[in-house]
Image: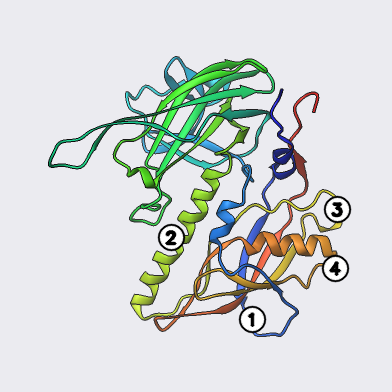
Amino acid sequence: MKPDCSFAIKAVFALMLGTVSIGSEVGAQYESHPVGSSSVWRSERREAPFYPLRLEVKVGEAWRQVTGYDGKRPTVGSSAAREVVKHSKPEFKIGAGEGFTDGVVWVEGSWKFLEQSVRAETQPPVVTARDTTLTVWPDRDLRDCFLVVAVWDLGRLIDESGEPRIAAIEVRPLRELVAQRKVKQRVSLPKHIPAAHLQWAVLVFSQGNQVLTVGESAGRLHGFFDLAAIAAAEKATRMRAATGRSFSPEIVRRLPIVPPQDTDPKWFGREIRLYADVSAQGTIVRISCADVDDPALSNYLQEAVGAWVFAPKVVSGFVIPSTVVVKVTLPERTSPALPPPGQ
């Protein structure tokens, strides 16, 4: 029996991102739409990624997209001009991608890990090994594949510069994946992160592009980026307030705009203004979209932008609520992810 991936097909799009800008603050009265008072819950609602990611490797001083593997070494560049990265310990990072590879990969298995430790009579236990076993199950044949396991510490979401901090990235070449054939992988997890703070997510790539990954961890990495953005906004706000100066509100994290499939084409490519009340905590507590006369699109935009994270306004060192104009431009088109054969 094949896993049910209908929830993922409904929730995930291989999309073109819209553009966004933030305008000046406004004082006009307008009809508003209340949204949740906190952004934290939004990091827990996702069943699958909202947009693709990509794996990058450091080559010299530049970051380049990993497009495949040659043996155990990552490669960059196109198939016609492939370059092998010969570092013995390559440095990786995860960034925004450009599109999903056609296909769906289920990642099965318990998200618990096996842990071995030793205990001295006068000392707390010392972790000597952490492992977990994953089962990868593709819906179709996939070429030049690799598995990425990203691990982070919930107690340390950002680095000193305020960037999201992924504690470890393990990459495992998979070669070819055959439709409906399960492949098991045993993965080692970092030992230095406290067990209560340890989280990880799994991504599968084919020829450099992410494959739609369905499973218990599918949206977990995006949730991490949400929480890291909230932590970065809080840190930036504290630093700004400490200067005693004034700062306008700033978008710290935005999510892609993927309008409903039945949206009138007249809205694509057009700039749309939303009026958002940003709290002193950086969350949007009330929002309106007076430019749009389509109720479904208006509601969607208010929900989508309402999930973004802001650094709030600071005036003479005091953090205060404010109302801002957020301008978005809808992408020209969207392309829904395809269901597996027979679904």
Which of discs 3 and 4 lies nearer the camera? The answer is 4
Mark earlier in primary sequence (1, 3): 1
> Of tags 1 and 2, which is closer to the observer?
2
The residue type indicated by label 2 comes to Ala
Residue ID for mark 4? 293
- Asked whether the viewer can see residue 76, the reply is no
Q: Which residue is mark 2?
A: 232
Q: Earlier in the sequence, mark 1 or mark 2?
A: 1
Mark 1 and mark 2: span between their CA atoms? 25 Å
Which comes sooner in the sequence, label 2 or label 3?
A: 2
Q: Residue furthest left?
A: 122
Asked if 40 appears above or below 332 in the picture, the reply is below
Label 3 to label 4: alpha-carbon separation: 14 Å
Q: CA distance from mark 4 to mark 2?
A: 35 Å
Q: Nearer the viewer, mark 2 or mark 3?
A: 2
Q: Quadrant of residue 87?
A: top left
Mark 3, residue position: 265
